[in-house]
Image: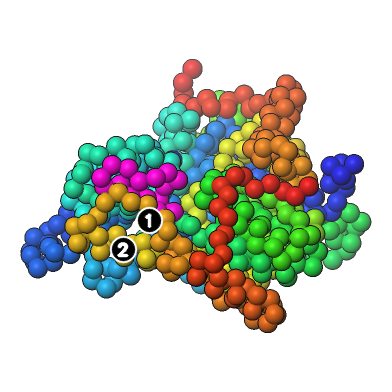
Amino acid sequence: MKTTLRRGLGILALAAIAWTTALSGAAPALAAKIKVAAIFTLPVEQQWISRIHKALNAAAARGDIDYIYSENVANTDYERVMREYSEAGNNLILGEVFGVERAARKVAKDYPKTAYLMGSSFGPSGENFSVFDNWIHEPSYLTGMVAGSLTKSNKIGMVGGYPIPEVNRLMNAFMDGAREVNPDVKFTVSFIGSWYDPPKAKEAAFAMMDGGADIMYAERYGVSDAAKERKVLAIGNVIDTQNEYPGTVVASALWHMEPTVDRAIAAVAGGSFAAEDYGSYSYMSHGGASLAPMDAKLVNAKTMAAIKAREDEIRDGLFRVNVNDSEPRSSK
Amino acid sequence: MEIVEILFTVSFWAAATRIATPLIFGTLGELICERAGVLNLGIEGIMTAGAMAGWMAVYQGADLWTGVVFAFAIGMIFGFIHGLFTVPLGLSQHVTGLGLTLLATSLAYFTYRMILPDVPSPPRIEAFQPFAIPILSEIPFIGPALFKQTALTYLAFVSVAVVGLVLYKTPLGLALRAVGENPAAAEAQGIDVYVMRIGAVMIGSGFMAIGGAFLTMSAFNAFFFEMIAGRGWICIALVVFASWRPGKALLGALLFGAFDAFQVRLQQALGGDIPYQIFLMLPYAFSILALIVMSRRAAYPKALMVPYRKGER
């Protein structure tokens, strides 16, 4: 189904590459700029990808890099696009290889002069294949504390896409946080088997609220909308949606790709890029994750102080949030 | 028992109706096409195009109903393409339909991206809101389940009735059914088979497009190119389930909606012990079973997928 689209985008991407090459040929002064290409499997407004796209756009706006990207690239086509970008002489290639872990590593091996920084569930490999991931379990824990203290029914609903490690660890951290402040809290966990089916996510959320859940963990689009319709509170994930849902989204665990991206760009510029795990640059201590400002109308001062204290402890390394990648289950 | 109790809650049936709405439109649209003898596998793409078109019209400042009409019109354009290839040219309805799905899906996303090249998060519109129909919504149990929905759901109910009436009680309906059963006989009656078939495919495709628009303008308020997520293919099966009858199509769509709503609640009631994939699979497994039972007596239009060539013997 995506083939035609991808072909169209592929031509556009090639045109863009040709255009940038022509441009840099005309003005040699620009040649020193690092050429960065990104390959995404979903559109750039999807919450996870939007964070990477934002950080790269910021770097491009500063004038550090030339940035091009392909979105909506199917996993079956991912390797080809990687090779195309590598052949085109990009210095740094970013993306997400959760569906093509092995193939992507093979490509990296074939282009030793190119630096790769990929979202991956596994470790770095070879000389030039680095990995990152959304390690935002720390603010997720904090949002769990918010949820645990705000629930009146002691029932929290959680709707996720697929139970992959990246999702599980955030959900588990959230549940740990909620249990810390409220041991009686019960969870209902549901997966919809899609990364983007808001009507389905909404139905799962409605069913949870029918069952008495009064706080919804919005891992997917659609959950906050359901919460808003029923005037129930929601917790955001990855992106800050508090402005879009005032009075509904009380707190959000945010992911910031800037520390990861900026470090990789600096490493490529300095010629020191190596195969590394950039995961820790998504931790709070590096500014890669944060707790969005809580809604002061909904969270009382005492709770807020407790959460702030915990936040400082995490940042100072005094409190460690457990990393648990196993599939979260509903409470009995 | 907790699981059985689910079936007797109003919220369950309200959810089933919500889930069924896009399927009612899609099934009705496919049914009209097939009744005229043309299989329309472009449905998945046409629903995507409708979802995009209706939503985009509203995002650009049109009111909601104008958006619905616009979606219908876009559906008709794609229907015309399908009709052109399959009716006068008599090309393979399977290949044309699948090709149309690829074209419409890609074109929908391409247009979306051309208009909105760089947006940080999915843009939103003010979608249709649920409202209660006076008197009808006060019927115990059925009222709040069926008549506290959004306007498009009511439109779906009305469409079923209208399509049923036209199909069985008017000369137009008779002509439409005739070209799907025996086009040569219809031609002998002075009915232009090509016009009839292309017209039916266009109207049917318009309904499909509204089914897609329901997802972006009522069930949710933003567009994403994969959000039809196979609902079109379900409609193809529902037409068989319905034995090509509008009333049964409504029933089939509601039944599938009920399976899906039940699955969601079952997953939450029993979650933890059984892998979630099993629950996600249930509506499809139930549907296959229902299809087996129902399709044994299904009488399909005799000229379905048979191209008509004038003067050929």
A211 or A326, which is in the foreground?
Answer: A326
Parent chain of label 2: A
Q: Is residue A129 magenta?
A: yes
Residue A302, x across and y down, in percent? 70, 80
The residue tagged 1 is: A278
Residue A219 position within the rendered picture, expressed as x and y whole percent measured from the top left: 59, 57
- In this picture the colour scheme is rainbow
Q: Which quadrant of the structure image shows residue B251?
A: top right
Horizontal relation, residue B223 to residue B154: left or right: left
- The verdict on residue A20 being magenta is no
Q: State the extent of the magenta-drawn residues as a range.
A: A119-133
Residue B30: x %, y % from top left: 60, 39
B310 vs A332, nearest the viewer = A332
**Residue type highlighted by circle 1:** Tyr
What's the magenta bit mostly, secondary-structure-wise? loop
Q: Which residue is mark 2?
A: A263
Q: Nearer the viewer, residue B238 or B245?
A: B238
**Residue B213 seen:** no
